[in-house]
Protein backbone atom coordinates (compact mmCIF):
# COMPACT_ATOMS: atom_id res chain seq x y z
CA UNK A 1 0.00 0.00 0.00
CA UNK A 2 2.82 2.42 0.89
CA UNK A 3 6.27 2.67 -0.61
CA UNK A 4 9.11 5.09 -0.07
CA UNK A 5 9.40 7.85 -2.65
CA UNK A 6 12.99 8.69 -1.83
CA UNK A 7 14.45 5.94 -4.07
CA UNK A 8 12.61 7.31 -7.09
CA UNK A 9 13.57 10.85 -6.15
CA UNK A 10 17.22 9.87 -5.85
CA UNK A 11 17.20 8.22 -9.24
CA UNK A 12 15.61 11.32 -10.73
CA UNK A 13 17.91 13.87 -9.13
CA UNK A 14 21.17 12.15 -8.21
CA UNK A 15 24.20 12.59 -10.48
CA UNK A 16 26.75 10.75 -8.42
CA UNK A 17 24.95 7.50 -7.54
CA UNK A 18 24.61 8.04 -3.76
CA UNK A 19 25.12 4.97 -1.58
CA UNK A 20 21.95 3.02 -0.83
CA UNK A 21 20.18 3.57 2.50
CA UNK A 22 21.14 1.29 5.40
CA UNK A 23 18.58 -1.36 6.32
CA UNK A 24 17.33 -1.60 9.94
CA UNK A 25 15.79 -4.77 11.39
CA UNK A 26 12.96 -4.74 13.95
CA UNK A 27 10.02 -6.88 15.00
CA UNK A 28 6.29 -6.17 15.09
CA UNK A 29 4.31 -8.53 17.32
CA UNK A 30 7.24 -10.93 16.95
CA UNK A 31 7.38 -10.82 13.15
CA UNK A 32 10.76 -9.82 11.70
CA UNK A 33 10.65 -6.74 9.49
CA UNK A 34 13.06 -4.41 7.77
CA UNK A 35 12.94 -0.70 7.07
CA UNK A 36 15.51 2.00 6.47
CA UNK A 37 17.65 4.06 8.80
CA UNK A 38 15.99 7.43 9.28
CA UNK A 39 12.45 6.07 9.08
CA UNK A 40 10.05 6.63 11.91
CA UNK A 41 8.47 3.56 13.47
CA UNK A 42 5.18 4.59 11.85
CA UNK A 43 6.75 4.78 8.39
CA UNK A 44 8.46 1.43 8.99
CA UNK A 45 5.12 -0.18 9.89
CA UNK A 46 3.33 1.31 6.89
CA UNK A 47 5.98 0.24 4.41
CA UNK A 48 5.73 -3.28 5.84
CA UNK A 49 1.99 -3.34 5.25
CA UNK A 50 0.93 -2.86 8.86
CA UNK A 51 -2.20 -0.71 8.66
CA UNK A 52 -3.44 -1.19 12.23
CA UNK A 53 -1.16 -1.06 15.24
CA UNK A 54 -3.51 -0.39 18.14
CA UNK A 55 -6.97 -1.10 19.54
CA UNK A 56 -8.69 1.87 21.15
CA UNK A 57 -9.36 1.78 24.91
CA UNK A 58 -13.04 2.75 24.56
CA UNK A 59 -14.39 0.63 21.69
CA UNK A 60 -11.43 -1.63 20.81
CA UNK A 61 -11.55 -0.27 17.23
CA UNK A 62 -8.39 -1.03 15.24
CA UNK A 63 -6.37 2.05 14.29
CA UNK A 64 -3.12 2.87 12.54
CA UNK A 65 -0.83 5.79 11.74
CA UNK A 66 -2.85 8.69 10.35
CA UNK A 67 -1.57 12.24 10.81
CA UNK A 68 2.14 11.30 10.93
CA UNK A 69 2.90 14.49 12.83
CA UNK A 70 2.21 13.72 16.47
CA UNK A 71 -1.31 15.05 16.72
CA UNK A 72 -3.83 12.24 16.28
CA UNK A 73 -2.40 9.62 18.66
CA UNK A 74 -3.71 6.85 16.41
CA UNK A 75 -0.25 5.30 15.88
CA UNK A 76 0.27 4.33 19.53
CA UNK A 77 2.34 1.17 19.98
CA UNK A 78 4.33 -0.64 22.64
CA UNK A 79 8.06 -0.19 22.03
CA UNK A 80 10.52 -2.31 23.99
CA UNK A 81 7.90 -2.82 26.69
CA UNK A 82 6.86 0.82 27.05
CA UNK A 83 3.23 1.41 26.10
CA UNK A 84 1.49 4.28 24.27
CA UNK A 85 4.57 5.40 22.34
CA UNK A 86 3.77 7.56 19.33
CA UNK A 87 5.21 5.61 16.40
CA UNK A 88 5.25 8.65 14.12
CA UNK A 89 7.53 10.57 16.49
CA UNK A 90 9.91 7.72 17.26
CA UNK A 91 12.94 7.06 15.02
CA UNK A 92 13.39 3.38 14.19
CA UNK A 93 16.40 1.70 15.78
CA UNK A 94 18.02 -1.68 15.10
CA UNK A 95 16.45 -4.51 17.09
CA UNK A 96 13.38 -2.60 18.32
CA UNK A 97 10.55 -4.80 19.59
CA UNK A 98 7.35 -3.08 18.48
CA UNK A 99 3.99 -4.47 19.57
CA UNK A 100 0.33 -3.70 19.11
CA UNK A 101 -1.10 -1.41 21.81
CA UNK A 102 -4.14 -3.26 23.07
CA UNK A 103 -6.49 -0.79 24.77
CA UNK A 104 -5.29 1.50 27.55
CA UNK A 105 -1.72 1.46 28.73
CA UNK A 106 -1.16 -0.38 31.99
CA UNK A 107 1.09 1.66 34.26
CA UNK A 108 0.75 -0.97 36.97
CA UNK A 109 3.10 -3.23 35.00
CA UNK A 110 5.82 -0.59 35.22
CA UNK A 111 5.32 -0.27 38.97
CA UNK A 112 5.69 -4.02 39.40
CA UNK A 113 8.99 -4.03 37.51
CA UNK A 114 10.54 -1.50 39.88
CA UNK B 1 -32.60 33.64 8.37
CA UNK B 2 -36.29 34.42 8.62
CA UNK B 3 -38.39 33.14 11.48
CA UNK B 4 -40.57 31.20 9.06
CA UNK B 5 -37.70 28.82 8.39
CA UNK B 6 -38.05 27.55 11.93
CA UNK B 7 -40.90 25.42 13.09
CA UNK B 8 -41.14 27.60 16.17
CA UNK B 9 -41.74 31.28 15.60
CA UNK B 10 -42.66 31.91 19.21
CA UNK B 11 -41.64 29.25 21.70
CA UNK B 12 -42.94 29.12 25.29
CA UNK B 13 -39.52 29.99 26.61
CA UNK B 14 -36.08 31.01 25.41
CA UNK B 15 -32.93 29.96 27.21
CA UNK B 16 -29.86 32.03 26.34
CA UNK B 17 -26.64 30.05 26.73
CA UNK B 18 -26.14 26.53 25.36
CA UNK B 19 -23.61 25.31 27.93
CA UNK B 20 -24.31 22.85 30.70
CA UNK B 21 -26.28 25.35 32.79
CA UNK B 22 -28.52 26.51 29.95
CA UNK B 23 -28.94 23.02 28.52
CA UNK B 24 -29.85 21.60 31.97
CA UNK B 25 -32.56 24.23 32.38
CA UNK B 26 -33.78 23.69 28.81
CA UNK B 27 -33.99 19.97 29.63
CA UNK B 28 -36.25 20.62 32.59
CA UNK B 29 -38.48 23.06 30.72
CA UNK B 30 -38.85 20.69 27.77
CA UNK B 31 -39.57 17.79 30.11
CA UNK B 32 -42.30 19.93 31.68
CA UNK B 33 -43.92 20.19 28.27
CA UNK B 34 -42.70 23.61 27.18
CA UNK B 35 -41.62 24.42 23.67
CA UNK B 36 -38.05 25.64 24.26
CA UNK B 37 -35.49 27.35 22.06
CA UNK B 38 -31.91 27.28 23.33
CA UNK B 39 -29.82 30.07 21.83
CA UNK B 40 -26.05 29.60 21.82
CA UNK B 41 -23.02 31.47 20.57
CA UNK B 42 -20.60 30.01 18.05
CA UNK B 43 -17.31 28.32 18.81
CA UNK B 44 -15.84 31.69 19.79
CA UNK B 45 -17.74 31.41 23.08
CA UNK B 46 -15.73 31.00 26.27
CA UNK B 47 -17.55 27.73 26.97
CA UNK B 48 -16.68 26.99 30.58
CA UNK B 49 -18.69 23.80 29.97
CA UNK B 50 -15.88 22.40 27.85
CA UNK B 51 -13.14 23.18 30.35
CA UNK B 52 -14.52 21.88 33.59
CA UNK B 53 -13.42 19.08 35.90
CA UNK B 54 -16.79 17.28 35.86
CA UNK B 55 -17.16 16.63 39.56
CA UNK B 56 -20.56 16.28 41.18
CA UNK B 57 -19.11 17.58 44.39
CA UNK B 58 -20.67 18.08 47.80
CA UNK B 59 -18.14 17.88 50.62
CA UNK B 60 -16.73 21.40 50.38
CA UNK B 61 -19.71 23.31 48.96
CA UNK B 62 -21.53 25.92 51.00
CA UNK B 63 -19.71 25.34 54.27
CA UNK B 64 -20.10 29.10 54.81
CA UNK B 65 -23.59 29.32 53.24
CA UNK B 66 -25.87 26.43 54.31
CA UNK B 67 -28.51 27.03 51.60
CA UNK B 68 -25.80 26.44 49.00
CA UNK B 69 -24.85 23.19 50.74
CA UNK B 70 -28.50 22.11 50.73
CA UNK B 71 -28.95 23.04 47.05
CA UNK B 72 -25.79 21.11 46.17
CA UNK B 73 -26.84 18.02 48.13
CA UNK B 74 -30.22 18.07 46.44
CA UNK B 75 -28.47 18.23 43.08
CA UNK B 76 -26.26 15.23 43.90
CA UNK B 77 -29.44 13.27 44.75
CA UNK B 78 -31.28 14.38 41.61
CA UNK B 79 -28.31 13.58 39.37
CA UNK B 80 -29.32 9.89 39.49
CA UNK B 81 -32.69 10.67 37.90
CA UNK B 82 -31.15 13.04 35.37
CA UNK B 83 -28.61 10.43 34.22
CA UNK B 84 -31.27 7.72 34.02
CA UNK B 85 -33.68 9.87 32.01
CA UNK B 86 -30.93 10.95 29.61
CA UNK B 87 -29.91 7.35 29.07
CA UNK B 88 -33.51 6.20 28.54
CA UNK B 89 -34.48 9.04 26.21
CA UNK B 90 -31.29 9.66 24.24
CA UNK B 91 -29.31 6.43 24.58
CA UNK B 92 -26.33 8.39 25.87
CA UNK B 93 -24.73 7.09 29.07
CA UNK B 94 -23.19 10.17 30.67
CA UNK B 95 -21.00 7.98 32.92
CA UNK B 96 -22.39 9.35 36.16
CA UNK B 97 -21.31 7.59 39.33
CA UNK B 98 -21.35 8.43 43.02
CA UNK B 99 -18.64 6.26 44.56
CA UNK B 100 -17.73 8.87 47.19
CA UNK B 101 -14.93 11.41 46.86
CA UNK B 102 -11.68 12.20 48.63
CA UNK B 103 -9.78 15.38 49.31
CA UNK B 104 -6.24 14.19 49.88
CA UNK B 105 -4.09 16.29 52.20
CA UNK B 106 -0.30 16.49 52.02
CA UNK B 107 0.18 18.05 55.45
CA UNK B 108 -1.48 17.92 58.86
CA UNK B 109 -2.18 21.63 58.46
CA UNK B 110 -4.37 20.89 55.43
CA UNK B 111 -6.22 18.19 57.36
CA UNK B 112 -6.78 20.52 60.32
CA UNK B 113 -8.01 23.36 58.11
CA UNK B 114 -10.59 21.12 56.45
CA UNK B 115 -11.68 19.54 59.71
CA UNK B 116 -12.12 23.02 61.20
CA UNK B 117 -14.38 24.15 58.33
CA UNK B 118 -16.44 20.96 58.45
CA UNK B 119 -16.83 21.12 62.24
CA UNK B 120 -17.96 24.75 62.14
CA UNK B 121 -20.47 23.91 59.43
CA UNK B 122 -21.96 20.93 61.22
CA UNK B 123 -22.19 22.91 64.48
CA UNK B 124 -24.51 25.45 62.85
CA UNK B 125 -28.14 24.86 63.79
CA UNK B 126 -29.27 25.57 60.20
CA UNK B 127 -26.70 23.28 58.58
CA UNK B 128 -27.94 20.52 56.27
CA UNK B 129 -25.74 17.82 57.75
CA UNK B 130 -24.06 15.36 55.42
CA UNK B 131 -21.95 12.27 56.05
CA UNK B 132 -18.17 12.62 55.94
CA UNK B 133 -15.09 11.04 57.46
CA UNK B 134 -11.65 12.34 58.32
CA UNK B 135 -9.18 9.58 57.50
CA UNK B 136 -5.54 9.11 58.49
CA UNK B 137 -2.90 7.82 56.10
CA UNK B 138 -3.43 4.14 56.90
CA UNK B 139 -7.17 4.33 56.41
CA UNK B 140 -6.80 6.19 53.11
CA UNK B 141 -4.24 3.59 52.00
CA UNK B 142 -6.77 0.81 52.64
CA UNK B 143 -9.28 2.49 50.35
CA UNK B 144 -6.87 3.95 47.76
CA UNK B 145 -3.87 1.55 47.72
CA UNK B 146 -1.92 3.64 45.19
CA UNK B 147 -1.48 6.74 47.35
CA UNK B 148 2.01 7.99 48.13
CA UNK B 149 3.73 8.11 51.52
CA UNK B 150 3.31 11.88 51.68
CA UNK B 151 -0.47 11.69 51.93
CA UNK B 152 -1.17 12.58 55.56
CA UNK B 153 -4.91 12.10 55.50
CA UNK B 154 -8.11 12.82 53.65
CA UNK B 155 -11.67 13.99 53.85
CA UNK B 156 -14.10 11.46 52.43
CA UNK B 157 -17.78 11.92 51.71
CA UNK B 158 -19.98 9.23 50.15
CA UNK B 159 -22.05 11.95 48.44
CA UNK B 160 -19.35 12.98 45.98
CA UNK B 161 -19.36 11.74 42.42
CA UNK B 162 -18.48 12.58 38.83
CA UNK B 163 -19.66 12.29 35.23
CA UNK B 164 -18.50 12.77 31.66
CA UNK B 165 -19.19 16.44 30.81
CA UNK B 166 -18.90 16.13 27.03
CA UNK B 167 -21.38 13.27 26.96
CA UNK B 168 -23.62 15.23 29.32
CA UNK B 169 -23.59 18.18 26.93
CA UNK B 170 -24.42 15.95 23.98
CA UNK B 171 -27.17 14.13 25.87
CA UNK B 172 -28.83 17.34 27.06
CA UNK B 173 -28.84 18.79 23.55
CA UNK B 174 -30.15 15.49 22.12
CA UNK B 175 -32.91 15.38 24.71
CA UNK B 176 -34.05 18.86 23.73
CA UNK B 177 -34.39 17.68 20.14
CA UNK B 178 -36.28 14.55 21.22
CA UNK B 179 -38.79 16.76 23.05
CA UNK B 180 -39.33 19.04 20.08
CA UNK B 181 -37.18 21.88 21.36
CA UNK B 182 -34.47 23.53 19.31
CA UNK B 183 -30.80 24.17 19.89
CA UNK B 184 -29.63 27.05 17.73
CA UNK B 185 -25.85 27.57 17.60
CA UNK B 186 -24.41 30.74 16.09
CA UNK B 187 -27.17 32.78 17.75
CA UNK B 188 -25.38 35.32 19.91
CA UNK B 189 -27.89 37.72 21.46
CA UNK B 190 -27.15 41.41 20.95
CA UNK B 191 -30.24 43.03 22.41
CA UNK B 192 -33.29 42.11 24.46
CA UNK B 193 -36.39 44.29 24.58
CA UNK B 194 -39.28 43.91 27.00
CA UNK B 195 -42.33 43.98 24.77
CA UNK B 196 -45.83 43.71 26.21
CA UNK B 197 -46.12 40.35 27.90
CA UNK B 198 -42.86 38.95 26.58
CA UNK B 199 -39.34 39.53 25.34
CA UNK B 200 -37.93 40.12 21.89
CA UNK B 201 -34.33 38.95 21.42
CA UNK B 202 -32.25 40.23 18.54
CA UNK B 203 -28.97 39.27 16.96
CA UNK B 204 -27.24 39.15 13.60
CA UNK B 205 -29.36 36.02 12.95
CA UNK B 206 -32.68 37.82 13.26
CA UNK B 207 -35.07 37.99 16.16
CA UNK B 208 -37.20 35.74 18.32
CA UNK B 209 -39.97 36.38 20.81
CA UNK B 210 -41.13 34.45 23.88
CA UNK B 211 -43.17 35.07 27.01
CA UNK B 212 -40.49 33.66 29.31
CA UNK B 213 -36.74 34.17 29.30
CA UNK B 214 -33.93 32.40 31.14
CA UNK B 215 -30.43 33.85 30.95
CA UNK B 216 -27.77 31.17 31.44
CA UNK B 217 -25.03 32.71 29.35
CA UNK B 218 -22.15 32.33 31.78
CA UNK B 219 -19.91 35.39 31.65
CA UNK B 220 -22.31 36.85 29.06
CA UNK B 221 -24.95 37.22 31.78
CA UNK B 222 -23.15 40.32 33.07
CA UNK B 223 -23.99 42.07 29.78
CA UNK B 224 -27.42 40.53 29.14
CA UNK B 225 -29.07 40.68 32.58
CA UNK B 226 -29.31 44.51 32.73
CA UNK B 227 -31.28 44.46 29.45
CA UNK B 228 -34.22 43.00 31.40
CA UNK B 229 -33.66 44.84 34.67
CA UNK B 230 -31.64 42.08 36.34
CA UNK B 231 -27.99 41.92 37.28
CA UNK B 232 -25.32 39.26 37.26
CA UNK B 233 -22.02 40.68 38.45
CA UNK B 234 -19.71 37.84 37.41
CA UNK B 235 -16.08 37.86 36.38
CA UNK B 236 -13.81 35.29 34.78
CA UNK B 237 -11.61 33.11 36.96
CA UNK B 238 -9.10 31.06 35.06
CA UNK B 239 -8.59 27.39 35.78
CA UNK B 240 -6.07 25.07 34.19
CA UNK B 241 -6.30 21.39 33.48
CA UNK B 242 -3.99 18.54 32.51
CA UNK B 243 -5.13 15.29 30.91
CA UNK B 244 -2.93 12.25 30.52
CA UNK B 245 -3.03 9.38 28.09
CA UNK B 246 -5.66 6.75 28.78
CA UNK B 247 -4.53 4.09 31.19
CA UNK B 248 -6.07 1.04 32.79
CA UNK B 249 -8.51 1.84 35.62
CA UNK B 250 -6.86 2.46 39.01
CA UNK B 251 -9.02 5.18 40.57
CA UNK B 252 -12.80 4.98 40.57
CA UNK B 253 -13.30 7.65 43.24
CA UNK B 254 -13.10 11.31 42.23
CA UNK B 255 -10.66 13.51 44.12
CA UNK B 256 -11.02 17.25 44.25
CA UNK B 257 -7.93 17.66 42.06
CA UNK B 258 -7.48 14.26 40.38
CA UNK B 259 -9.92 11.93 38.70
CA UNK B 260 -9.72 9.13 36.20
CA UNK B 261 -12.38 9.43 33.54
CA UNK B 262 -14.62 6.56 32.52
CA UNK B 263 -12.48 6.23 29.40
CA UNK B 264 -9.18 5.97 31.26
CA UNK B 265 -7.55 9.40 30.97
CA UNK B 266 -6.42 11.02 34.20
CA UNK B 267 -7.52 14.62 34.73
CA UNK B 268 -5.39 16.76 37.00
CA UNK B 269 -6.97 20.02 37.86
CA UNK B 270 -7.75 22.76 40.18
CA UNK B 271 -11.03 23.82 41.59
CA UNK B 272 -12.52 26.85 43.22
CA UNK B 273 -11.94 25.37 46.63
CA UNK B 274 -8.19 25.14 46.06
CA UNK B 275 -7.99 28.91 46.03
CA UNK B 276 -4.26 28.83 46.62
CA UNK B 277 -3.63 28.34 42.93
CA UNK B 278 -5.69 31.21 41.77
CA UNK B 279 -3.12 33.96 41.88
CA UNK B 280 -0.57 32.01 39.88
CA UNK B 281 -0.73 31.80 36.11
CA UNK B 282 1.16 30.09 33.30
CA UNK B 283 3.23 26.94 33.39
CA UNK B 284 3.91 27.53 37.07
CA UNK B 285 0.36 26.46 37.83
CA UNK B 286 0.60 23.33 35.72
CA UNK B 287 3.83 22.22 37.34
CA UNK B 288 2.44 22.75 40.84
CA UNK B 289 -0.66 20.76 39.92
CA UNK B 290 1.43 17.95 38.44
CA UNK B 291 3.84 17.89 41.37
CA UNK B 292 1.05 17.63 43.93
CA UNK B 293 -0.58 14.90 41.84
CA UNK B 294 2.68 12.86 41.79
CA UNK B 295 2.94 13.13 45.56
CA UNK B 296 -0.63 11.88 45.91
CA UNK B 297 -0.24 9.05 43.36
CA UNK B 298 3.43 8.35 42.54
CA UNK B 299 2.51 6.02 39.66
CA UNK B 300 1.17 9.01 37.72
CA UNK B 301 4.78 9.95 36.91
CA UNK B 302 4.84 7.19 34.29
CA UNK B 303 2.02 8.73 32.31
CA UNK B 304 2.35 11.01 29.31
CA UNK B 305 0.46 14.27 29.27
CA UNK B 306 -1.71 14.51 26.19
CA UNK B 307 -3.11 18.03 26.56
CA UNK B 308 -3.28 20.99 28.89
CA UNK B 309 -5.80 23.77 28.67
CA UNK B 310 -7.50 26.48 30.62
CA UNK B 311 -11.03 27.73 30.90
CA UNK B 312 -12.76 30.62 32.56
CA UNK B 313 -15.01 30.02 35.51
CA UNK B 314 -18.05 32.20 35.98
CA UNK B 315 -17.32 33.69 39.37
CA UNK B 316 -19.29 36.06 41.60
CA UNK B 317 -17.62 38.24 44.22
CA UNK B 318 -18.38 35.80 47.05
CA UNK B 319 -18.02 32.63 44.96
CA UNK B 320 -21.65 31.60 45.36
CA UNK B 321 -24.18 31.28 42.54
CA UNK B 322 -26.48 34.08 41.50
CA UNK B 323 -30.17 33.42 40.87
CA UNK B 324 -32.55 36.32 40.28
CA UNK B 325 -35.93 37.04 38.71
CA UNK B 326 -38.02 39.98 37.56
CA UNK B 327 -40.68 41.21 39.96
CA UNK B 328 -42.90 43.00 37.44
CA UNK B 329 -43.61 42.55 33.77
CA UNK B 330 -42.99 39.27 31.98
CA UNK B 331 -40.92 36.65 33.81
CA UNK B 332 -37.17 36.66 33.22
CA UNK B 333 -34.58 34.76 35.22
CA UNK B 334 -30.82 34.79 35.46
CA UNK B 335 -28.64 31.87 36.58
CA UNK B 336 -24.89 32.24 37.05
CA UNK B 337 -22.71 29.62 38.71
CA UNK B 338 -19.28 28.02 38.44
CA UNK B 339 -20.44 24.49 39.29
CA UNK B 340 -22.69 23.75 36.36
CA UNK B 341 -21.98 20.00 36.40
CA UNK B 342 -22.66 19.58 40.11
CA UNK B 343 -25.82 21.66 39.85
CA UNK B 344 -27.06 20.06 36.61
CA UNK B 345 -29.22 17.64 38.62
CA UNK B 346 -31.11 20.30 40.51
CA UNK B 347 -31.25 22.71 37.56
CA UNK B 348 -32.83 20.03 35.38
CA UNK B 349 -35.05 18.30 37.93
CA UNK B 350 -36.14 21.11 40.29
CA UNK B 351 -35.28 24.62 39.09
CA UNK B 352 -36.65 24.33 35.55
CA UNK B 353 -39.86 22.46 36.50
CA UNK B 354 -40.53 25.16 39.12
CA UNK B 355 -39.97 27.92 36.57
CA UNK B 356 -42.33 26.11 34.23
CA UNK B 357 -45.03 25.57 36.85
CA UNK B 358 -44.99 28.87 38.72
CA UNK B 359 -42.77 31.22 36.73
CA UNK B 360 -41.03 31.92 40.05
CA UNK B 361 -37.72 30.74 41.49
CA UNK B 362 -37.88 28.07 44.23
CA UNK B 363 -37.95 29.67 47.71
CA UNK B 364 -34.65 28.05 48.68
CA UNK B 365 -32.89 30.33 46.17
CA UNK B 366 -33.83 33.60 47.91
CA UNK B 367 -30.35 33.96 49.52
CA UNK B 368 -28.75 33.92 46.07
CA UNK B 369 -30.13 37.26 44.93
CA UNK B 370 -27.45 39.63 43.61
CA UNK B 371 -28.86 42.23 46.01
CA UNK B 372 -26.47 40.67 48.55
CA UNK B 373 -23.64 42.53 46.82
CA UNK B 374 -25.30 45.89 47.54
CA UNK B 375 -24.44 45.83 51.23
CA UNK B 376 -21.95 48.66 51.72
CA UNK B 377 -18.52 47.61 52.90
CA UNK B 378 -17.49 48.82 56.35
Image (tube, helix red, strand yellow):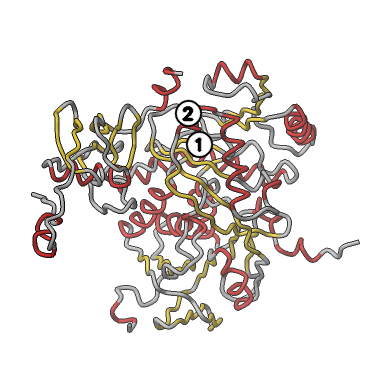
**Which of these two is toward me, B309 or B315?**
B309
**Which of these two is toward me, B316 or B196?**
B316
Horizontally, residue B349 falls left or right of residue A30, namely: right
Q: Position of residue A80 (x, y in %)?
A: 31, 28
Point out the tag, 1 or 2, that comes first from the N-terminus.
2
Label 1 sits on a secondary structure element that is strand
Residue B89 in sight: no
Rendered image quadrant of residue B372:
bottom right
Horizontally, residue A76 falls left or right of residue B198, namely: left
Q: Residue furthest right?
A: B378
Does A11 sit above or below residue B129?
below
**Which of these two is toward me, B4 or B339?**
B339
Q: Residue furthest front?
A: A16
Chain letter of the residue carrying label 2: B
Q: Which residue is mark 2?
A: B251
Q: Which residue is mark 1?
A: B259
Horizontally, residue B290 falls left or right of residue B363, namely: left
**Residue found at x 56% / y 24%:** B147
In contact (CB < 8 Å): disc 1 and disc 2 = yes
Label 2 sits on a secondary structure element that is loop
Residue A54 in sight: yes
Q: Position of residue B226 (x, y in %)?
A: 64, 76
Q: Quadrant of the C terminus of chain B?
A: bottom right
**Residue found at x 49% / y 68%:** B16
Amino acid sequence: MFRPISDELRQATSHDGSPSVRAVGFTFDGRRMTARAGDTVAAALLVNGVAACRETPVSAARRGPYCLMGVCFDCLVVIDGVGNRQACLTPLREGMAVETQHGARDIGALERDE
Amino acid sequence: MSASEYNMTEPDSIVVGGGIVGASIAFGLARSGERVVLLDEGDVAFRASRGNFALVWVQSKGLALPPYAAWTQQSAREWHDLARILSDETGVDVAHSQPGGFTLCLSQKEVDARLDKLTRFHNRPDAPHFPYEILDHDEVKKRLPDIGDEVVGAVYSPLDGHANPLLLMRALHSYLGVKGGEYRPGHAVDAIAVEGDGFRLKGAWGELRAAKLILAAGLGNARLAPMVGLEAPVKPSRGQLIVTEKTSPFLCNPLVTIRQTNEGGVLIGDSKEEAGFENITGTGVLSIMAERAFRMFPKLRHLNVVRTWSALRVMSADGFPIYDQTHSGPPAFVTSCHSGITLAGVHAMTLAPTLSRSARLPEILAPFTPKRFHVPAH
